[in-house]
Amino acid sequence: MTLYPNKIKWVLVLVGCISFIAMGIFLIGDHDTETLLGLFICMLGGLGILISILTLWPNSSWLKLGPDGMRERVLFRKFHYHWSEVTRFEITVVRHRSRAHRTDTKFVSFWMKCDEDTRSLSECYGEKAEELMKILES
């Protein structure tokens, strides 16, 4: 079974980063502070565009599940984990807070026998974290 990143999510990130660049260009003006802020926003938007394009690039990111283990490819880097080396799976929640608004991002994490160290998948590949964990545990 092969799972791929959610293309709709990454296209929305790409559109958001393009709007960041437009905002940054709009801020560049006569004042030094506004110009620096505009350039900084443009650089962040450019970095986001680069990451979005690399993630959307065919065969750059995926998660393959097989009888021997799971293989993950993230931005052209490959990782392989044997099922016999994985001790358990768990959902890791990262909380983000900005003023009154709070959001939670969930990742699937797993522990390895060799060092009892935690590894996390880079994303949920179009699935909810709970659903991906059920797929991995089956």
Image (cartoon, rainbow, N blue to C red):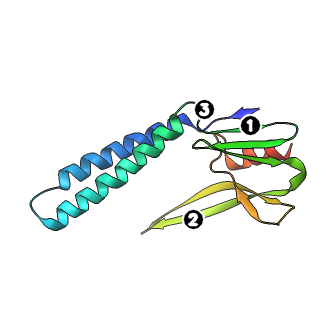
Quadrant placement of the C terminus: top right
> Label 3 sits on what residue type?
Asn
Residue 37 versus residue 75 in the image, above or below: below
Marks 1 and 2 in Cβ contact (< 8 Å):
no
Q: Residue at x 17, y 55 (%)?
A: 28
Q: What residue is shown with label 2?
A: 95
Quadrant placement of the N terminus: top right
> Label 1 sits on what residue type?
Lys
Label 1, residues with CA under 10 Å away: few <14, some 14-19, many ≥20: some
Q: Nearer the viewer, residue 76 or 96?
A: 76
Q: Position of residue 63 (x, y in %)?
A: 70, 40
Label 3, residues with CA under 10 Å away: few <14, some 14-19, many ≥20: few
Q: Nearer the viewer, residue 54 or 17?
A: 54
* Real-space Cα separation, disc 1 to disc 2, in angstroms: 28 Å
Q: Position of residue 41 (x, y in %)?
A: 30, 56
Q: Residue at x 69, y 49 (%)?
A: 129
Q: Residue at x 31, y 45 (%)?
A: 19
Label 2, residues with CA under 10 Å away: few <14, some 14-19, many ≥20: few
Q: Position of residue 101 (x, y in %)?
A: 46, 63
Q: Relative to residue 65, is residue 56 drawn left or right?
A: left
Mark 3 and mark 1 lie on one chain; the one further toward the N terminus is 3
- Spot the residue most to the front: 77
Dot 3: element: loop
Q: Relative to residue 47, is residue 74 drawn left or right?
A: right
Q: What residue is shown with label 1?
A: 64
Q: What residue is shown with label 3?
A: 59
Q: Position of residue 31 (x, y in %)?
A: 11, 64
Mark 2 and mark 3 lie on one chain; the one further toward the N terminus is 3
> Label 2 sits on what residue type?
Arg
Dot 1: element: strand
